[in-house]
Image: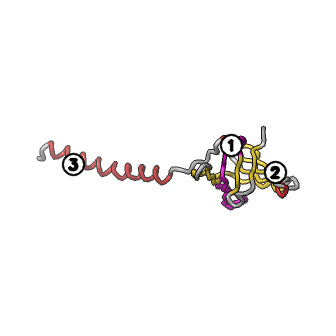
Amino acid sequence: MRPKKKEGTQSRRKWFWLFTPVLLYSIFGLWQGSPKSRSVPNKLMGTWRSSDPKYADRSLEIDNVTINFGTGDGTVTTGFIKKVEAVPEGGHTLYTISYVDDGKEEQCSFYYAAAKEEIIYFKNQPSIPWVKALS
């Protein structure tokens, strides 16, 4: 006959080996599975327009779910937002919106600056300001 002390030790080992993998899997799953933020900051939501004559008929509209590119002649290209990333750079913030358009993942990157008015500058066109339209 085994002493009771030994039974308690075996029982604890059994529980240890049963729950350790579950605990590790949970921790790893939470760490790996934490999604990038999909929520769009309120300051980015709205319609953006440029005073540059080349873009007079163009617009960018951002809401919680979509990013819409007004491409002239009344046409709009819509992407469904997957994630939003923000990286501070100097006095501005670089935002990258990842979205899906026609099943293809795309990105739109721009700098946001708030002075007298809210302005964004597309990363690939830093000299062209886009101002948030008043709603």
- Name the residue rendered at 18%, 45% in the picture: 7
Label for residue 51? 2
Quick check: marks 2 and 3 in contact, CB under 8 Å? no
Sequence-wise, which precedes: disc 3 or disc 1?
3
Sequence-wise, which precedes: disc 2 or disc 3?
3
| Rendering colour mode | secondary structure
Quadrant in the picture for residue 115: top right
Query: The disc labelled 2 sits on which kind of residue?
Result: Ser
- Quarter of the image with the C terminus in it: top right
Quick check: marks 2 and 1 in contact, CB under 8 Å? no
- Name the residue rendered at 38%, 50% in the picture: 22
Residue 111 coordinates in the image, percent (x, y) = 66, 52
Label for residue 115? 1
Q: Magenta region: which residues?
A: 97-118
Separation (CA) of disc 2 from disc 1: 17 Å
Q: Residues within 10 Å of mark 1 (few under 14, many from 20)?
A: few
Q: Residues within 10 Å of mark 2 (few under 14, many from 20)?
A: few
Residue 42 coordinates in the image, percent (x, y) = 66, 40
Residue 119 coordinates in the image, percent (x, y) = 71, 47
Separation (CA) of disc 3 from disc 1: 67 Å
Task: Report the mark closest to the observer, 2 or 3.
Answer: 2
Sequence-wise, which precedes: disc 2 or disc 1?
2
Q: Nearer the viewer, residue 75 or 43?
A: 43
Furthest-top residue in this view: 135
Query: The disc labelled 3 sits on which kind of residue?
Result: Gln
Q: Residues within 10 Å of mark 3 (few under 14, many from 20)?
A: few
Badge 1 marks a residue whose secondary structure is loop
Badge 3 marks a residue whose secondary structure is helix
Separation (CA) of disc 2 from disc 3: 76 Å
Query: The disc labelled 1 sits on which kind of residue?
Result: Ala
Badge 2 marks a residue whose secondary structure is loop
